[in-house]
Image (spheres, rainbow, N blue to C red):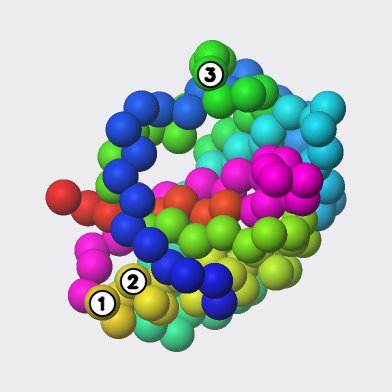
Amino acid sequence: MEALLRLKLCAPLEYFSAPELDFFAGPFVQNDSAPELLFCFEIEREQGGHIDPQADGFLGRPVFSGRGDGKEGEHCLPAGLYLFVQKRKALGPEECIGMAIEQQKDGLWERLQLENRLYIRYLFEDHSPVTQFFRPIKN
């Protein structure tokens, strides 16, 4: 697992709606000319508070998918406090679910109260694709 951080996002990242994007068709390999992608999911309530959740039922319904540069649009990754982790490669759906589960386990181990929402962001940074995971921390 990459370094797990508490990240305070001071301004929202905004994206245009892209309902045609299918998260489960990934991985999404980004490059200099590809827009950032953001997927937002509800986490199944039963799985969201467990230290050992089941991968099959972890992700609930998709809330939205977006595309853009993070500067404008109708959907956003809101400003706030997040449990954050990233991997310097484009991850497919199974790898993403595994990383999100590890993120949740680590957060619960640290006794954090996590919200049942997960944001997965694909972007290109420093000449390589990156997959980021944002899990809101309850105040």
What residue do we see at 53% from left, 66% from top?
Answer: 100
Tell me, yes or no, whether the two marked residues, 2 and 1, touch with CB atoms within 8 Å.
yes
Q: What's the magenta region?
A: 111-131
What residue do we see at 68% from left, 27% from top?
Answer: 67
Q: How many marks?
A: 3
Give coordinates of residue 91: x percent, y percent.
74, 60
- Which residue, given by chain and number where applicable, does mark 1 sit on? 110
Q: Nearer the viewer, residue 122 or 114?
A: 122
Q: What whole-number distance in Å separates the C-alpha atoms at marks 2 and 3?
A: 29 Å
Tell me, yes or no, whether the two marked residues, 1 and 3, touch with CB atoms within 8 Å.
no
Q: What whole-number distance in Å separates the C-alpha atoms at marks 2 and 1?
A: 5 Å
- Which residue, given by chain and number where applicable, does mark 3 sit on? 71
Classify residue 95 by image quadrant: bottom right
Say if the magenta span includes residue 124. Answer: yes
Mark on residue 107? 2
Secondary element at image label 1:
loop
